[in-house]
Structures are given as structure tokens and as C-alpha cells.
Image: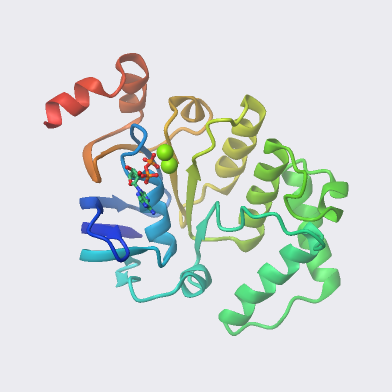
Amino acid sequence: MLEIKNLHAKIADTDTEIIRGLNLTVKPGEIAAIMGPNGSGKSTLSYILSGREDYEVTEGDILYNGESILELDPAERASKGIFLAFQYPVEIPGVATMQFLKVAMNEQRKARGEEELKTPDFMRLVKEASAKLQINPDMLKRPLNVGFSGGEKKRAEILQMALLEPKLCILDETDSGLDIDALKIVADGVNALKSPDRAVVVITHYQRLLDYIVPDTVHVLYKGQIIRSGDKSLALELEANGYADIIGEAA
Ligand code: ADP
Ligand code: MG
Ligand code: MG
């Protein structure tokens, strides 16, 4: 589903290369975890996957279902079913979360050439998804992310993900301030989305999240390259021994 081949990328308009020959394959149905020390390029990788213009791919390719997505803008990538969990991290004052979700769903439908959702259908979908994720409907009347707690932001994010039904979900859990409740919300959301035709890439600095999401594969990112891949036991090894051994072996 996702094939990253010898990817090299730098910060646009500079010579600073952050991703330095990265290879990664993620199959449908797979939950892949990308771990790595701070500053290894995890967030940069997720920004590049989302299509942000601040980064320039200088070599290699990113294939999604066999086709290169490098020339697609973020909206085109989203309409093909690629979802970045930090896609809408911003506070949107004056727009109720509910309204925001409706616009997001309809934009996606429009990009796919589908009809707009009728309000009763939208309401039904939101109700079902919120109930599944144990989201209090009152939260959806508030403006998106404005004054939301960490846990509420995560709930809103997972709700967007559930409603947009992406095929490839990429979650960059940059927020080291996530408390255990927020981690569980993310984990429950990801576990609920697991299906044979969907892949999830969870990017995390912390092994802790992987106590709740059981990854099929674990990849260690260091200095812009995947230096080690394995199954979930690799995450446990990292928890026990830290990154130093693996980095030493790779060097
Ligand atoms: P991680 O998410 O693994 O902690 P990042 O992708 O945030 O790592 O950063 C990787 C490296 O690239 C860091 O050294 C960071 O300082 C640098 N970097 C990323 N984006 C920029 C940018 N826009 N300008 C300058 N340096 C950047
Ligand atoms: Mg960081
Ligand atoms: Mg990061």
C-alpha cells in the first residue's frame, strides 16, 4: 500500500537534508510503528507524506497503491484516502466541530466526484461514530480544538479519521505531553479502524503507546534512515535497552 524507496528530502530552499535514503514498505491491514530518538526525522517524514511544501524531495519516490504521489498536493492525497492525524491540529474559533466535520466530509466527497451528504445522513454518521468512540455530543457543538483538553483534541482527531474512512492513516504522536487517557483514546481509535484494507503508520517516540496498539511491524528511524526493522518485540527491546545499542550497530 505504501512503498517509500530511497527517499531523500531536504528543507525547501536550503541544503539541509533531513531524510537520507529512507526505505519502508507498509502492506494493507498492517499497523506499522516508526520509532526513533528526538530529531531523527519522524515528523519530517510525516510532513513529506502529507505533501507539505516546506520540504523538497530530491531523490527516490513514494508510491501509494503502486503510484507515485510526489506530484499530488495535500488535498489530492487526502481524497485518495491518505489521512494525517495532525492534518487539522489548529484551533478554529467560530466554527463548531460538527460543522467542521461536515465540511471536511463534503470536501472529500466533492474531490471524489460524489454527492454532498444530506444533513440527516451526516448527523446519523456522526452520532454512530461518536457513540463508538465515546465522544460526548456536547463537545461537537464547541469550536474545533478551542480550549479542548489534550484528550478532547485526540477524540476530535480520531473522530475525523473514523468519518473520513481513510485507507492509509499516519499518526504522528509528537505530543510528549499526552497523558495516559489520551494515549488510550488514540489506541482505541486505531484499533477500531484496523481492517484488512487499511494500513496505519504510528509514529512515536514512546514505547508506551505500543502497550495499547499492537504493531505488526516496528521500524527504527535514525538520521533520516530506517536502521532496523522487526516485529513488536523490537519495541520491547527498545524500551528495555534504549536506542544506543541499535544506533551503535548501525554505525
Ligand atoms: P523528530 O520528529 O524525529 O523529533 P523532526 O523531523 O522534527 O524529528 O526533525 C528532524 C531534524 O530536522 C531535526 O534536527 C530538526 O531540527 C530538523 N528540522 C526539521 N524541520 C526543520 C525546519 N523546517 N528547519 C530547520 N530544521 C528542521
Ligand atoms: Mg521531535
Ligand atoms: Mg517529531
Residue 61 visible in the current orientation: no
Picture coordinates of residue 138, whole percent (x, y): 88, 48
Q: Quadrant of residue 141?
A: bottom right
Front residue of this view, candidates 240 and 213: 240
Q: Is residue 174 left or right of residue 102?
A: left
**Above or below, 227 relative to 124:** above
Looking at the rendering, in which quadrant would you find the N terminus? bottom left
Ligand 3 shows up in the quarter that is top left
State the count of labels.
Answer: 0
177 vs 128, left or right, is: left
Left or right, 187 with respect to 125, comes to: left
Is 143 situated left or right of 157 in this image? right
Q: Residue at x 33, y 24 (%)?
A: 233
The answer to whether residue 212 of the structure is visible from this angle is yes
Q: Which residue is at a point 76% across and 49% down the rendered structure image?
A: 146
Q: Quadrant of residue 206?
A: top left
Say which residue appears at 34% left-offset and 14% top-offset. 240
State the colouring used for the structure image.
rainbow
Quadrant occupied by the C terminus? top left
Looking at the rendering, which quadrant does residue 245 occupy?
Answer: top left
- 186 above or below 56? above
Outermost residue to the top: 240
Image position, residue 199 (x, y; %): 44, 52
At which x and y percent is residue 83?
Answer: 52, 59
